[in-house]
Amino acid sequence: MRIVLVGPPGAGKGTQAAYLAKNLSIPHISTGDLFRANISQGSNLGKRAQAYMKAGDLVPDELTIAMAKDRWEQPDAAHGFLLDGFPRNVKQAEALDRILKDEGIGLDAVLDLEVPEEEVVKRIAGRRTCRNDSSHTFHVEYKKPKVDGVCDECGGELYQRDDDSEETVRRRLEVYHRETEPIIDYYRDQDLLITIPALGPVSEVTQRAMDALRERN
Ligand code: AP5
Ligand code: ZN
């Protein structure tokens, strides 16, 4: 299956993607995680992306599309993938369509995680992220690590992401409404959109998404 996961910052895309990818045996491809890995490695791509991310702005499309394409063309994604955080504007969505079409494949579904804005602000404020791997995320209230400040999965140090400050979160939400929300209509028009109410326990949200995907196929 080839799936795209959309939703505002802090909606729980990364959290859900980890479970969904495991259940569906497909790789989880997060452009945010790929950029953060590049930043911690000090690569040229990381250096170019860093300032945009810190400000809460989108990284330029050329860089993002090339990086995402490179990842989904790896052998482990040959039979499907779950894209998290990409596409993030109509230009990226059109590029994705075009590239997949050239490869003779297409998307199966787009899951839109629906969460009220006051909840995403709470989720982001309490999020703690692992320094070794930004796909390892916790929450001070909703998903506490076993040992304070330490990642359950790899023992790495937990910290608050640079772009999780109140000011940058406001900017990210603004960018989401302006740039990313239009892709919801874009995918609705293609009959690919599935809206998932994403309030409630993590496992219940995963179940809703799995049920919706099953119903569709
Ligand atoms: P990215 O890393 O994609 O950030 P985002 O979209 O803002 O999403 P988040 O990672 O903040 O949140 P999430 O929805 O994954 O939530 P999570 O599961 O962690 O992008 C960062 C930046 O990179 C962008 O601003 C941009 O600069 C750049 N970028 C990335 N992709 C790009 C692209 N395509 N084009 C251009 N630029 C791009 O959950 C949040 C918290 O809530 C966690 O603490 C979690 O434990 C908790 N939680 C999750 N689910 C629940 C639940 N059901 N109940 C209670 N708590 C929950
Ligand atoms: Zn970790």
Image (tube, rainbow, N blue to C red):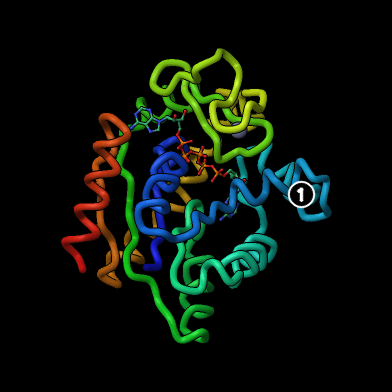
Nearer to the camera, 1 or 63: 1
Ligand 2, seen in the image, is in the quarter at top right
Name the element at disc 1. Answer: helix
Residue 207 sits in which quadrant? Answer: top left
| Quadrant placement of the N terminus | bottom left
Work out whether 147 lies above or below 162.
Answer: above
Work out whether 186 lies above or below 125.
Answer: below
Q: Is residue 40 left or right of residue 64?
A: right
Q: Is residue 30 left or right of residue 111?
A: right
Horizontal and vertical percent position of residue 92? 53, 65
Amino acid type, callout 1: Gly
Q: Residue at x 52, y 68 (%)?
A: 77
Work out whether 110 lies above or below 104.
Answer: above
* Circle 1 crowding by C-alpha within 10 Å: few under 14, some 14–19, many from 20: some
| Quadrant placement of the C terminus | bottom left
Residue 133 sits in which quadrant? Answer: top right
Q: Which residue is mark 1?
A: 46
Nearer to the camera, 85 or 132: 132
Q: Residue 88: in sight, yes or no?
A: no
